[in-house]
Image (spheres, helix red, strand yellow):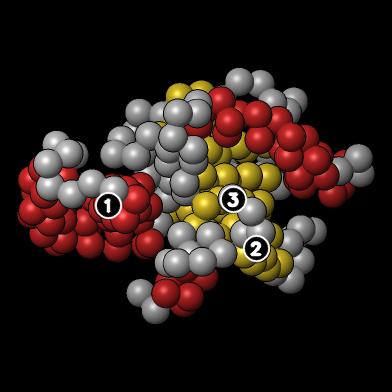
């Protein structure tokens, strides 16, 4: 992908660190998100365990004292998400559209090896001043994540409808690939569009990287932000 659209944002520094996120999007068409990177200070090991419980695999050693996992979208092999926690620092990376035929998990690990040592070097390292050392601070009280609860309720409501949509697309999708319906350059382009829409909607892909519990202050911020 050449010349993608790149969008990023930084919050005001809070508790000695700000939060940053950036996303890369296709430059044309529906501008599908290709890659998303988030760095914040809301990391706990339990979030990594959520990935592992949902079928994820542990990341290899990338940074000292780091603990991470990655998980593939069960419906789209090129979709993959990873979380890497070091102390309070949390690095989240989502590959929204990988390349068919490549090892997306290997690409994700290689990418993390490039960026994680730099991004987690300061944020995840305890201060040299004992009075400011983050490890001595009490752990914040964890509460249910309101965003995950809303996503789960939404999934229960619309999953039967999504199942009907997939079934409706499945037959024409298979018929098209028999080679007897339509052939030629235009048909090939249409085939790509049909393939993309055939596996487009997957709320489970949104729920999986969403932690079940978050610090109480973060839960309040989520509630205000999304008017829950």
Classify mark 3: residues with Cα within 10 Å, few (<14), some (14-19) or many (20+): few
Query: Residue 33, percent across and down?
Result: 50, 57
The quadrant holding residue 91 is top right
Classify mark 2: residues with Cα within 10 Å, few (<14), some (14-19) or many (20+): some
Q: Are marks 1 and 3 in contact (CB under 8 Å)?
A: no
**Residue at 39% of width from left, 79% of height from top?**
227
SS assignment at label 2: strand
Classify mark 1: residues with Cα within 10 Å, few (<14), some (14-19) or many (20+): some
Residue farthest right in this picture? 129
- Is residue 38 among the parts visible in the rendering? no
**Residue at 76% of width from left, 44% of height from top?**
119
**Residue at 74% of width from left, 71% of height from top?**
12
- Per the model, the C-alpha gap separating discs 2 and 3 is 12 Å
SS assignment at label 1: helix
Tell me: 181 left or right of 107.
Answer: left
Of residues 6 and 38, the one nearer the viewer is 6
Tell me: 52 left or right of 180.
Answer: right
Which-is-in-front pick, marks 2 and 3? 3
Q: Which residue is mark 3?
A: 1
- Work out whether mark 2 precedes mark 3 in sequence or the reverse, and give the earlier one: 3
Of residues 38 and 197, the one nearer the viewer is 197
Query: Residue 133, percent across and down?
Result: 81, 44
Q: Which residue is mark 1?
A: 187
Q: Which residue is mark 2?
A: 6
Query: Residue 1, percent across and down?
Result: 59, 50
The quadrant holding residue 130 is top right
Residue farthest front in this picture? 184
**Residue at 57% of width from left, 45% of height from top?**
93
Of residues 184 and 76, the one nearer the viewer is 184
- Per the model, the C-alpha gap separating discs 1 and 3 is 22 Å
Above or below, comparing residue 107 to residue 147 in the picture: above
């Amino acid at each position: 992908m050449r010349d993608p659209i790149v969008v990023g944002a930084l919050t005001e520094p809070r508790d000695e660190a700000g939060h940053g996120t950036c996303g890369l999007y296709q430059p044309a068409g529906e501008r599908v998100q290709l890659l998303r990177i988030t760095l914040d200070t809301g990391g706990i090991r339990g979030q990594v365990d959520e990935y592992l419980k949902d079928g994820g695999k542990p990341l290899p050693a990338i940074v000292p004292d780091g603990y991470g996992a990655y998980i593939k979208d069960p419906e789209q092999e090129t979709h993959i998400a990873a979380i890497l926690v070091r102390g309070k620092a949390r690095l989240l990376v989502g590959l929204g559209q990988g390349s068919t035929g490549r090892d997306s998990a290997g690409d994700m690990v290689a990418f993390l090896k490039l960026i994680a040592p730099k991004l987690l070097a300061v944020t995840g390292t305890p201060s040299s001043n004992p009075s400011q050392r983050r490890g001595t601070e009490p752990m914040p009280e964890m509460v249910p994540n309101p965003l995950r609860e809303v996503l789960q309720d939404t999934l229960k409501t619309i999953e039967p409808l999504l199942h009907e949509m997939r079934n409706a697309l499945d037959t024409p999708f298979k018929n098209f690939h028999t080679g007897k319906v339509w052939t030629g350059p235009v048909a090939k382009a249409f085939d790509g569009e049909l393939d993309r829409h055939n596996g487009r909607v997957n709320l489970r892909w949104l729920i999986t990287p969403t932690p079940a519990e978050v610090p109480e202050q973060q839960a309040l911020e989520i509630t205000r932000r999304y008017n829950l």
